[in-house]
Amino acid sequence: MNYREAGVDIGRKANALQAAAAKIGETYTPEVLKGMGAFGGMLLASRLKGMREPVLVASTDGVGTKTLLAVQTGRYEGLGFDLVHHSVNDILVQGARPLFFMDYIASARLEETLLGAVLASLAEACKAVGIPLLGGETAEMPGVYREGALELAGTIVGVVERDEVVDGKKVRPGDVLLALPSSGLHTNGYSLARRVFEGWNLEEPREELAGRSLAEALLEPHRCYLREVERLWGAGVEVKAMVHITGGGVYENLPRVLPLGLGAEVWRGSFPVPPIFGLIQRAGQVEEQEMYRVFNMGLGYILVVSPDRVGEVQALLPQSHPVGRIIEGSGVQVV
Amino acid sequence: MNYREAGVDIGRKANALQAAAAKIGETYTPEVLKGMGAFGGMLLASRLKGMREPVLVASTDGVGTKTLLAVQTGRYEGLGFDLVHHSVNDILVQGARPLFFMDYIASARLEETLLGAVLASLAEACKAVGIPLLGGETAEMPGVYREGALELAGTIVGVVERDEVVDGKKVRPGDVLLALPSSGLHTNGYSLARRVFEGWNLEEPREELAGRSLAEALLEPHRCYLREVERLWGAGVEVKAMVHITGGGVYENLPRVLPLGLGAEVWRGSFPVPPIFGLIQRAGQVEEQEMYRVFNMGLGYILVVSPDRVGEVQALLPQSHPVGRIIEGSGVQVV
């Protein structure tokens, strides 16, 4: 491929994946420099020059075994949202706004329809967030991957002013945990969920899931909390700490942003638990504590604010619920 | 883990991998911001403020099936260099200097010794290049990976002044290709190489390899060309285009940086071909053209310069060889 021929320079991805290529092109902001025969993607970073002390924030993550359910049911359209939203949330916790995304897709064999669907999904997710899918890599490795298995990982890079990094330093006992709801499992707990539902009909509508099928409920894409948090920032609301509830649930994720000497109490029943979790718990006879250790249980993203800001946050974000508080001590108790 | 306890904040990697964690800590430049309970790694990007028009350059890549040979022979110490060097070279082609690296390591099961060795290797490679291993992710997915198989991928982010992006625009017919030697296969062609040597003794010293074993020759780490190119920049030598010879060999990689209407001629016999390639060709009865399509054949990195700069480059980089020239037309001919 000659660089002048490459209108949308996605390198290895261009052949016979035109629809996905066009969608990737739509993610390109004016900051993306194109047509350079690029081995790497290029982003003009002039906006960092206007900042006082720009801090780049980067995170690498994967979708995990949620891909196996997508393959099993032939539903790939949510996977890009899963990966991009997970990644956006991970750096948002530190106050960073996303700049660009890079993907990594690997399998024993990458059939074009599958690859096109995953790339299109990644591009749609990036476009919705407002960042370019700047580059990526695809690999076919039959010696590494199980037949039919899919790996989807990626790296996000964002930026935050150094003095606006959210670091939990001002968190005090009595501060309130306000949760934004998850849409389901997001991208964690799929090993357990897949074990529990082995042999079940994934496509049958179920009453316990309000008429949805297991496939629909389990593959519901990871939610993104960028717009909600931006709304708070726009209104000048001080958020002392933020937590993205991923693998390890509230038990492992909340302590990551709390200063030494502080713990947290999470109030059972104070927030809606999506029905898929109840079904997993009953079908798998999983203890409740284990459920909170593996899954987000409906707590997608937690904001830590002082008690006098709770009303303001709830006015701006009607979906938010007070679900607990900061206490002296350490660790997390679900009470 | 509480953020204050985490001297070296590598999150998920900290447990029982202390040696690797210490090495990762050694990669941290003063620009790395630590101890924030970080979901993402943070790098103070003040140096971009001092640039005229900073362009971020990012590339994601994997080591491919070279990992399978490493697992088979228990030699992991080169894998980090493979990944980091491959990545550094990929963005160097556009004139970018590396800023930081993010890794992704996945397997069916990640045994601690293996994970520690791979992380230590990544950290050593990053340290040698002078960049922090800012973050990463490890995943254990028995449903995705074959038993004993290892995935190693990563993302590099670098930076270049917009008006210093190397883009091949000034390349003219008659310009000279100067090659810097590869150390062996680097990270490409392992599917073919593994097929050719299936059943061979990998540890036996071989006369054809100057007394080295197949394992040693095949696992020789990917070379990094950053220091060489920096030497040219330091001396003010204009390099019109650069090519990292990876998958697809000279045939696919050279055209990526040539303007429309130009092709290249590569002169057989003008450069040393490492003995491992001759052995693969003979043992596998591979046609020569196919060899040049799959492997770098000793051409690790190619500089395109005008004929009057060749002497200067060779004086600065005694390892460089004139190996071909730019011609009118298109495509690459090995003559």
Image: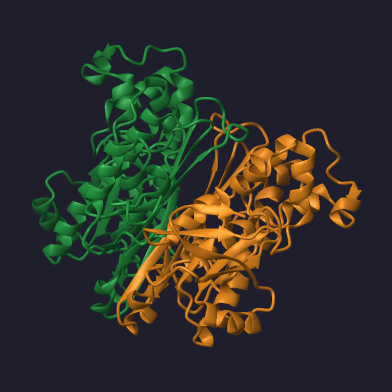
Chain colours: A orange, B green
Q: Residue at x 61, y 71 (%)?
A: A127
Q: Nearer the viewer, residue B87 or B312?
A: B87
Q: How many labels does the image show?
A: 0
Picture coordinates of residue B136, whole percent (x, y): 42, 50
- Image position of A152 (left or right of A238): right
Q: Which of B220 and A282 is in front in this view?
A: A282
Picture coordinates of residue A78, whole percent (x, y): 70, 57
**Placement of the C terminus of chain A among the 4 image quadrants:** bottom right
- Image position of A128 (left or right of B266): right
Q: Evaluate whether residue A158 shows in this view.
A: yes
Q: Residue at x 33, y 26 (%)?
A: B75
Picture coordinates of residue B185, whole percent (x, y): 35, 34
Picture coordinates of residue B156, whole percent (x, y): 37, 55
Q: Evaluate whether residue A75 shows in this view.
A: no
Residue reaching furthest to the left: B315
Q: Is residue B37 above or below residue A191?
A: below
* Quadrant housing residue B15: top left
- Image position of B169 (left or right of A122): left
Q: Nearer the viewer, residue B61 or B16?
A: B16
Q: Which of A240 and B215 is in front in this view?
A: A240
